[in-house]
Amino acid sequence: MSRPLWLKPPPFAENLLAGSSRTTIAGSTPFAWLELGAVAMVFSMVAILAVGISGTFAPLASLKPISLNPMMLPAYALRTVLRMLAAMGASLVFTLIYGTLAAKSRRAEMVLIPLLDILQSVPILGYLSFTVTFFIGLFPGNVLGAELASIFAVFTSQAWNMAFSFFQSLRTTPRDLDEASRAFRFSSWQRFWRLEFPFAVPGLVWNMMMSMSGGWFFVVASEAITAGNQQIALPGIGSYVAVAIQRRDLSAIGWALLAMTVAIVIYDQLLFRPLVVWADRFRAEQIAAQTAPHSWFLLLLRHSRFMRGAAQPVKASMRRLLRAHLLNLLPARSQATTHTATQRIFDWVWSLVVCLVASSIVVVIASYVATGVGLADVWTAVRLGAFTLARVSVLIVLASLLWVPAGVMIGLRPRLAEIAQPLAQFLAAFPANLLFPFFVIPIVAFSLNPDIWLTPLMILGTQWYILFNVIAGTTAYPTDFIEATKNFRFHGWQWWRIAMLPGIFPYYVTGAITASGGAWNASIVAEVASWGNDHVVAHGLGAYIAQMTTSNDYPRIVLGIAVMSAMVVLFNRLLWRPLYGYSERRFRLD
């Protein structure tokens, strides 16, 4: 299969990918060009990052109005991508800590997983409504405060998906590998870094890609910030799109779309494609895959003597740190069942404390909401939530029917995945705001029903969680299992029922949970569409929260967020959590 032009390596890397022996001969012309290319690319990236970060510490008054001149888009794209990468780093640290605590401690899981359900259900506008003032207050009169508020908003669109994926992987680590780690007397620290984290890497990498794209989906809301009566437009593609929509400038929308495409392709080739290749080494299998993913940039770095020499001290230090015999905290499995009576007492006391704390929080929220709303407002929020719930349920079913087969097909074909990976990232990153003119204009012109015709916008924030998790599950599916299905001549529905669906089911459930939360968040954007002076509103809880946020009606904002969180948690508890437990018991790779 031939690759499209934008996925082909640069000319100086062709010999490297072809495996030419000339590239390994010191002093030869190809080697010199490769060495020079690797060093130049790395130092160019460092210089670009330094330029992008320098504007972060400027005075707030130095921010210039957003210009629709296309020549400004490279600088805007750089600032937007840097915010997303900063949020991704914070999300990764959060994921490792939060997911590990939830997976290792049953009592912590009782609190952290329901809390994660609530956190992913809170829309990005809900976070911005209460955090912008805080971050700007930390650095008054400085751009850094607004940047931190924007980064935190992007963080809330990235972290929950990654945390769910990591938690699922830790809970489904093969028992035989866990027993082997205990037989070798690994400490908790060693077991985490040498078994559990590597097992979780393939799924985590694909969910990082999805989370990065999820940040693009809410880029307009995260960069066009309102702090009291002050409007702050941070330099970025999100602010550029907001101004273009306000001015009805379709050419500016097109330029923003092109800038997004270029930015996604660049960070896919320089960051995520190398991560996919690196993650492939951690697949749980006994037979090597016939075809493996590759990355021209990773090969370029690996064949550079300068880069290998520069990375060697860091690599040696990390190896010593990760293999250190630290934190020997977990008991052996034979000891885990002792003192059951004591454990039951502690569980009962812990559950009581959690219930009391949760009840206190509910009372505080109810008291605050009661100061500005009545029972009629509560009923309105619940009724509008039912509209949004119906849309979310239908879209989850449609997305599952479409993207589960597509994800399996992509995951089983590394060459196809190489093409589909940046394409899927671009489609997942496509902000709903860019499609507003194509929906608002026909709805206004033909008096169409917004409740129906705005619903397709929500699929943009739903389907990709399922696709990326199914791809992750398929790529993690052992090659020896696939070979066994060929030997047993499984075909058609028998192959899906016996082999593939059980193998990807834990990943699908994780994707469906995060897709549900993503759909609820997307309703904030999808149920209210604007194009210039034309505004179209659908009946739904997302539109309710968006309207209350615009009017700064905080009691009703809290009411809308509380109703949305309650519906998401209830939906997850009644449907997805039982399926999650079933997949954990029945479909482990043991």
Image (cartoon, rainbow, N blue to C red):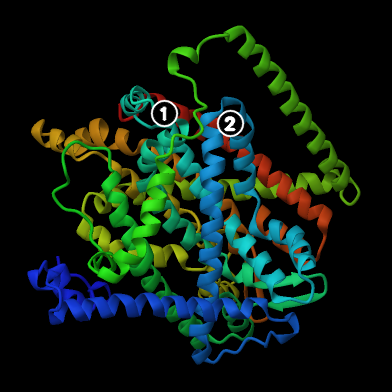
Q: Is residue 232 above or below residue 481?
A: below
Judge left or right: residue 456 versus residue 193.
Answer: right
Q: Which residue is mark 2?
A: 109
Three-letter amino acid code of the residue under disc 1: Glu
- Number of the front mark, 1 or 2: 2
Measured Cα–Cα span from mark 1 to mark 2: 15 Å
Q: Secondary structure at mark 2?
A: helix
Q: Residue at x 67, y 44 (%)?
A: 565
Camera sees residue 235: no
Residue 506 percent location from the top left of the image:
39, 36
Query: Which of the pair 423/559 is nearer the observer?
Result: 423
* Image quarter hosting the N terminus: bottom left
Q: Residue at x 63, y 72 (%)?
A: 223
Residue 184 percent location from the top left of the image:
33, 26
Q: Secondary structure at mark 1?
A: helix
* Image quarter hosting the C terminus: top left
Q: Which residue is mark 1?
A: 584
Camera sees residue 68: yes
Q: Place residue 269 in its image quadrant.
A: bottom left
First-in-chain label (1 vs 2): 2
Q: Are marks 1 and 2 in contact (CB under 8 Å)?
A: no
Q: Is residue 493 above or below residue 277?
A: above
Please state the total of marks drawn on the protein image.
2
Residue 554 percent location from the top left of the image:
82, 57
Residue 538 percent location from the top left of the image:
64, 61
Q: Residue at x 71, y 44 (%)?
A: 563
Judge left or right: residue 250 versus residue 227.
Answer: left
Q: Is residue 169 above or below residue 301?
A: above
Query: Which of the pair 202/43 is nearer the observer?
Result: 43
Judge left or right: residue 126 versus residue 403.
Answer: right
Query: Which of the pair 364/300 is nearer the observer?
Result: 300
Q: Residues within 10 Å of mark 2 (few under 14, many from 20)?
A: some
